[in-house]
Structures are given as structure tokens and as C-alpha cells.
């Protein structure tokens, strides 16, 4: 009788197959913090690397926030040495950089991580970057987006694949499954003590809000995961429709994007909202942190077309109306 696969490993392999995350010959950079999620991801990828036909490279960021962060760094290097995986390490004073840039620590930390992963990928000619997000992370992200006031895009949460490059083979595994897997396999991952400090918004969601919601629905994490997949399908359809409209009434040029105002005003409100977000994504590379109130203000400006005819939804973008055009100008 064939040996039955571990539940988490089966989930991991099913997610890869169902979402076509990995193809033979892929070179994959694995983001590894040393915590349960990333150590589980690295362990599974390493265990099945011959079966999947892949090459692995590890990338570790030391944020220098905790006193024991250097121990995390050493732990990851030791794990990679035992597995025979090349490991790249970068140290970055995230809190200091965040203060200098007057940005949130989480935001800056995320950018530094992804920039480093991409740097390693380019150096190693890797075509995929594996991130250890799990189903609980997805639920937390969706709730954070709801609190922020984001639209349908925010309800997509964290998907198994993004931009064809970032892959998340553990996205259908719960945090409990991962912790159980670590225990069964004696992986002894590092534990980030700051995860219990409710000074970050995500930790408040994780430690206070989600447990309260679980009192009403014990399966809330799975329910939100299901919702994110449904919304993704719907948003893909909407995006295709909006893209067709953008190609008809949009005019990208050096340093700006223009939309035909009279044609824009003929569109249904839902299409206008999505077209604005799509155009901002084209202008800035992402509509992250653009909230409903920003979109509403832009639509009001377009509807009135009188008085004050420019708006700054954030410090990176100016939108103005001129000569029957809605003009989106990225700012330096």
C-alpha cells in the first residue's frame, strides 16, 4: 500500500498543481525568516524539489528590530547549510529607515524584503519567488483591508500567485496546520516575540479581533479564504471589461495618463470606480492605499467639472481636469 502523504504536504502539492505555481526547471528564491511558516515552506520545497524539478535559493532579511534577530539569521543559515541550499542574507535597520522616510515600519519592512528577494532573483536568474503566507495571513489581510475601507480588490486578500512571479504554496494551510507540522517534524522554528505585541494593526487583528469573530464563526478563516477566491474570479472579469474601456478612452503618454472626460461621464458608477483604480495602477504600478473616499472625490470632481479641478489622492499622484480630459500625473 502506498504511503499516505502528510496532510499539510498534500495541501502544499495540491495548491501548486491547482494554481500552476511551479514548472519543471523553475529556479525559486524562498523568503525565509526562520519562523514556522517559512521554515515549513522551505522544508516542503526542499523535500519535493526533485519531484518538482526545481532549484532553490534562500533569502533572509534581518530587520534588526529584535535583540535576538541575529540568532534568527544564524538559524536560517544553519538550516540552509544542512539542506545544501545557497543562502543570501541582508541586514537592514528597518525602524531607523521608517523614521527617516516617515513611513510605517510594516510598510518599509515589506518593501525592503521584496526588493531584496527580487535582487537575489535577478542575481541567480530565478523566475519565481516563494513567500510563506498562509490562510490565516489571508484572513488578517482581508480584515485589514475592510478596516481601511478598500473596495473589492482588497477582498481578494492574498492570492496563491501574483504577477506570475510571487508564489504562495502554503496559502491554503492554516497556521494551526503549520505549527502542527513543525512539531511533528521537529523543525524547531524561531518564534517572533513581536507577534504578540499589539502595537501593529495586523497584530490587533490577529490577537484580538479574529479570536472574537471565531466565537461567532469558528470557520471564519476558511470562510474568508473562500470569499477571497470568489472575489478574485469576479474581479478578473471586471478587470477585463475595464481594460477594454481603458484602451478605448485612455491615452497614456510620457509622464501622464489621460482619460476622455465626456466618455468617462457616460459610464456606470461601478465602471467609473474601477476605471479610476485601474488607471491609478497604470500610473503608479499599484492602487495600494487608494481608499474609497479618494475614488469618490475624483468622481465628484469629474461630475462637477467646475471650481477646483485638481486633487491629490496621495503624495505620489496628482489628478486634474483640463480640456475635457482627466489627467493622472505621477509625482516624483
Image (cartoon, grey):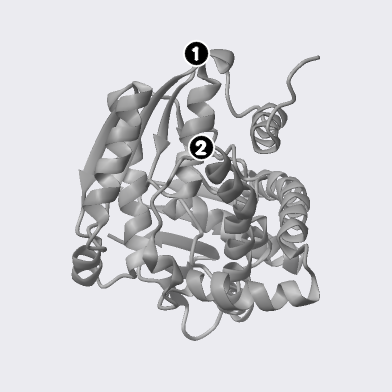
Whether residue 262 is visible to the viewer of this picture, yes or no, is: no
Q: Which residue is mark 1?
A: 25
Residue placed most toward the observer, 170 or 77: 77
Residue drawn at point x = 73 percent, y = 20 percent = 3
Q: Which residue is mark 2?
A: 41
Rendered view: 205 above or below 10: below
Task: Give whichever of discs 1 and 2 has the lower sequence position.
Answer: 1
Rendered view: 60 above or below 108: above
Q: Does dot 2 land on a helix, a strand or a loop?
A: helix
Rate crowding at label 2 as few (under 14), some (14 to 19) or many (20 or more) other CA atoms within 10 Å: many
Residue placed most toward the observer, 97 or 33: 33
48 displayed left or right of 174: left
Residue drawn at point x = 22 percent, y = 72 percent = 99
Whether residue 95 is visible to the viewer of this picture, yes or no, is: yes
Q: For the N terminus, give its image quadrant.
A: top right
Q: Position of residue 37 (x, y in %)?
A: 50, 47
Q: Does dot 1 land on a helix, a strand or a loop?
A: loop
Q: For the C terminus, give its image quadrant.
A: bottom left
Q: Position of residue 178 (x, y in %)?
A: 58, 47
Amino acid at each position: 500500500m502506498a504511503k499516505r502523504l502528510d496532510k499539510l504536504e498534500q495541501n502544499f502539492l495540491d495548491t501548486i498543481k491547482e494554481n500552476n505555481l511551479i514548472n519543471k526547471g523553475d529556479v525559486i528564491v524562498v523568503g525565509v525568516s526562520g519562523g514556522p511558516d517559512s521554515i515549513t515552506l522551505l522544508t516542503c520545497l526542499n523535500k519535493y524539489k526533485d519531484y518538482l524539478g526545481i532549484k532553490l535559493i534562500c533569502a533572509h532579511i534581518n530587520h534588526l528590530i529584535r535583540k535576538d534577530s541575529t540568532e534568527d539569521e544564524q538559524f536560517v543559515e544553519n538550516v540552509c547549510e544542512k539542506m545544501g541550499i545557497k543562502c543570501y542574507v541582508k541586514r537592514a535597520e528597518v525602524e531607523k529607515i521608517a523614521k527617516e522616510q516617515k513611513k510605517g515600519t510594516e510598510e518599509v519592512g515589506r518593501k525592503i524584503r521584496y526588493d531584496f528577494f527580487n535582487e537575489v532573483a535577478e542575481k541567480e536568474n530565478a523566475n519565481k519567488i516563494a513567500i510563506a503566507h498562509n490562510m490565516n495571513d489571508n484572513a488578517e489581510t482581508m480584515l485589514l483591508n475592510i478596516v481601511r475601507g478598500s473596495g473589492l480588490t482588497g477582498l481578494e486578500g492574498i492570492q496563491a500567485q501574483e504577477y506570475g512571479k510571487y508564489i504562495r504554496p502554503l496559502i491554503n494551510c492554516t497556521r494551526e496546520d503549520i505549527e502542527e507540522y513543525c512539531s511533528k517534524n521537529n523543525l524547531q522554528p524561531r518564534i517572533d516575540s513581536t507577534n504578540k505585541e499589539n502595537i501593529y494593526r495586523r497584530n490587533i487583528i490577529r490577537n484580538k479581533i479574529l479570536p472574537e469573530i471565531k466565537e461567532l464563526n469558528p470557520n471564519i478563516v476558511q470562510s474568508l479564504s473562500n470569499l477571497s477566491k470568489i472575489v478574485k474570479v469576479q474581479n478578473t472579469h471586471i478587470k477585463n471589461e475595464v481594460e477594454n474601456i481603458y484602451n478605448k478612452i485612455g491615452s497614456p503618454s510620457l509622464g501622464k495618463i489621460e482619460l476622455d472626460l465626456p466618455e468617462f461621464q457616460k459610464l456606470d458608477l461601478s465602471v467609473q470606480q474601477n476605471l479610476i483604480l485601474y488607471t491609478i495602477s497604470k500610473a503608479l504600478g499599484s492602487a495600494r492605499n487608494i481608499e474609497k473616499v479618494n475614488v469618490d472625490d475624483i468622481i465628484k470632481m469629474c461630475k462637477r467639472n467646475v471650481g477646483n479641478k485638481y486633487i491629490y489622492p496621495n503624495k505620489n499622484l496628482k489628478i486634474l481636469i483640463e480640456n475635457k480630459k482627466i489627467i493622472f500625473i505621477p509625482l516624483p
